[in-house]
Image (cartoon, rainbow, N blue to C red):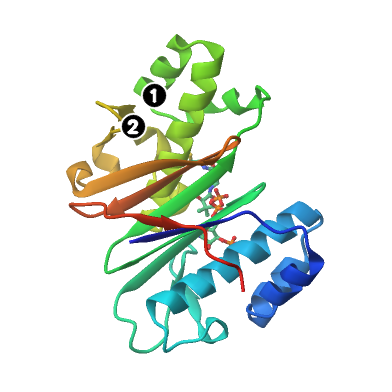
Amino acid sequence: MDLSLAVPPESTYRLDQMLELLNDDERNRAGRFRHDDDRRTFITAHALTRLGLSRHHPGITPTEWTFEDGPWGRPDPTNAGIGELRVNLSHTRDMAAVVAADAIQVGVDVEHMTQEDWIYETIDTVFSADECTSLLRLDEASRRERFYLYWTLKESYIKARGMGVSLPLTQISFAPSDGDGVVLEVEPGVEDEPSAWQFAIFHPSPTVRGAVGARTDELDLVSSWPTLR
Ligand SMILES: CC(C)(COP(=O)(O)OP(=O)(O)OC[C@H]1O[C@@H](n2cnc3c(N)ncnc32)[C@H](O)[C@@H]1OP(=O)(O)O)[C@@H](O)C(=O)NCCC(=O)NCCS
């Protein structure tokens, strides 16, 4: 399973090169962002996706990839001959991430860490009772780290399921386990078997946190920072 990471370039020349890899729909979407930062991360994430998929299947060039949205909006590649190739992308300020795997449900999330406190305003609508309790027990610095740990893990899981926020978020619960491990627990409404899942967390920069979730026995994750061209 591949995890590709990239910092969006400042250079207009390099962004234009990446824009040429995207299809009309992606280019139109890129053109609609009001903030340059958002546009740069969007273009980078989608170019990174196409380049990553072509590394998986060198017979298909980056511009040739086609996608179709699933029932809850997750785009899956539809080219002939790719089997059950799955891909998922995430973009945040200053970082894009893409995970790709054969025949495994995968999801990725990266989040830029803000130092503001509004992030805590809606925790009871997003986190489980156990997650909320554990957050409130921590000192400020640890609480912020834990918030982003839970958030990215939960996003990676709901994105891997392809169902986004249609899943009951407060019924999905993560807890740190020994070492770097995490344990997933779900209530019956989530309709899943938590032991079928593996997760990996990563810190691609001092201000960005990320997680990958995959429905697999063994998470064999290879990370890289590919050249964007
Ligand atoms: C749709 C959703 C996946 C968006 O997540 P996000 O954190 O805002 O954005 P990310 O950058 O991580 O991911 C966006 C990408 O996920 C993909 N995506 C879209 N719908 C998806 C779905 N149902 N499942 C998986 N992936 C999806 C797309 O490729 C999208 O890229 P694009 O918008 O550039 O086309 C969904 O999880 C959501 O709406 N989250 C809102 C945030 C929230 O409330 N999270 C609470 C859980 S902790």
Q: Is residue 105 left or right of residue 23?
A: left
Amino acid type indicated by mark 2 = Phe
Q: Earlier in the sequence, mark 1 or mark 2?
A: 1
The answer to whether 148 is drawn above or below residue 10 in the figure is: above
Within 10 Å of the Cα at label 2, are there few (<14), some (14-19), or many (20+) other Cα atoms? some
**In the rendered image, which quarter contains the N terminus?**
bottom left
In the image, 222 versus 163, the foreground residue is: 222
The answer to whether 3 is drawn above or below residue 29 in the figure is: above
Instruction: Identify the residue at image location x=28%, y=63%.
Output: 104
Q: Is residue 62 visible?
A: yes
Q: Is residue 168 left or right of residue 40?
A: left
Instruction: Identify the residue at image location x=67%, y=66%.
Output: 43
Residue 61's x, y, as percent?
A: 51, 86
In the image, 86 versus 210, the foreground residue is: 210
Label number found at residue 131: 1
Label number found at residue 174: 2
Residue 14's x, y, as percent?
A: 73, 69
Residue 105's x, y, as percent?
A: 31, 60
Q: Is residue 191 visible?
A: no
The answer to whether 186 is drawn above or below residue 217 in the figure is: above
Q: Mark 1 and mark 2: span between their CA atoms?
A: 7 Å
| Contact, mark 1 vs mark 2 (Cβ under 8 Å) | yes
* Element under disc 1: helix
Image quadrant where residue 80 sits: bottom left
The answer to whether 17 is drawn above or below residue 225 in the figure is: below
Residue 114's x, y, as percent?
A: 65, 31
Amino acid type indicated by mark 1 = Glu
Q: How many marks?
A: 2
Instruction: Identify the residue at image location x=73%, y=68%.
Output: 15
